Structure formats: structure tokens, C-alpha cells
Amino acid sequence: MGEKSYVSMDTCIICGEAKGIVLDRRLRPRFERETITSVEPCEKCSEKYLTEGVMLVYIGDNDYDLLVIRDEAFERLFNREVPPGMFPTNRIVRCEKEVISELKSCWAEQSKEENL
């Protein structure tokens, strides 16, 4: 952890690229050099991942985790259609960290079996 500042680069939750600048209006030094201020990814990641997929995201006090799955997988796993609404916000679903961990574990197992 570096020195805090009143200005920071707002970065994409997926790729880490800069999306803009964040400024504390009271000029308090509270930001790291790079800060994630929103679960909504940058335009490039939205186009790449969320046009045909849904991002499951967990936001904790000091950490986060995410996983993007295809629409079909979302509908099979959760027995519901992709939520309707404004793109890309309708394709971002908050969930518990254990859900993401379990899905990543299943994916890793399946990938391992396919490589045998």
C-alpha cells in the first residue's frame, strides 16, 4: 500500500485499464494510485465479455472476486433467464464469494479432465 492521494485513476474491474479519474471533492488523501469505483467494466470489456455473458461479482470489505459465464450457463445454473434491463448493467449479478469459488473449482476440474 502506497501513499494516499486525493486523486486516483478509476480502473476497470476486469482488465485494470484506466476508465477515468476520481477526485475527492474535499481534497482528503484517501485513494490509492488506482481505484475501482464501480463493478461496471470498461467499454472494451463490456463488449468482449458481457454481450453474450453474465458477470458474477462478489464485493467484500477489502477484496472482490468475479467470474463471467455465458448466458446459457447462467440460465442452466440458476434456472432463470438473464435479467432484462439496460446493457451492460443487467448482465452484472452480485453473489456470494462461495458461489464464484465453487464455479471456478468446477471449471478447473472440467478443464483438467478434458486435457487428460
Image: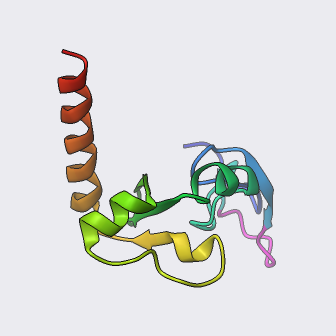
Farthest bottom residue in view: 85
1 above or below 84? Answer: above
Percent x, y of residue 114: 23, 24
| The one of 113 and 88 positioned closer to us in this rendering | 113
Q: Going by the image, does 57 lie left or right of 3?
A: left
Q: How many marks?
A: 0
Quarter occupied by residue 75? bottom left
Quarter occupied by residue 87? bottom right
Q: Magenta region's main secondary structure? A: loop
72 above or below 14? Answer: below
- Location of the C terminus by quadrant is top left
The structure residue drawn at horizontal position 55% and vertical position 58%, both measured from the top left corner, is 52
The structure residue drawn at horizontal position 79% and vertical position 78%, both measured from the top left corner, is 26
Q: Which residues are magenta?
A: 23-30
77 above or below 106? Answer: below
| The one of 90 and 39 positioned closer to us in this rendering | 90
Q: Going by the image, does 93 lie left or right of 28?
A: left
Q: Going by the image, does 52 lie left or right of 10?
A: left
The structure residue drawn at horizontal position 62% and vertical position 66%, both measured from the top left corner, is 40
85 above or below 73? Answer: below
- Location of the N terminus by quadrant is top right
Residue 24 magenta-drawn? yes
| The one of 38 and 50 positioned closer to us in this rendering | 50
Farthest top residue in view: 116
Percent x, y of residue 115: 25, 18
The structure residue drawn at horizontal position 71% and vertical position 56%, both measured from the top left corner, is 42
The colour mode here is: rainbow
Q: Going by the image, does 4 lie left or right of 94?
A: right
Percent x, y of residue 31: 66, 59
Percent x, y of residue 92: 50, 69
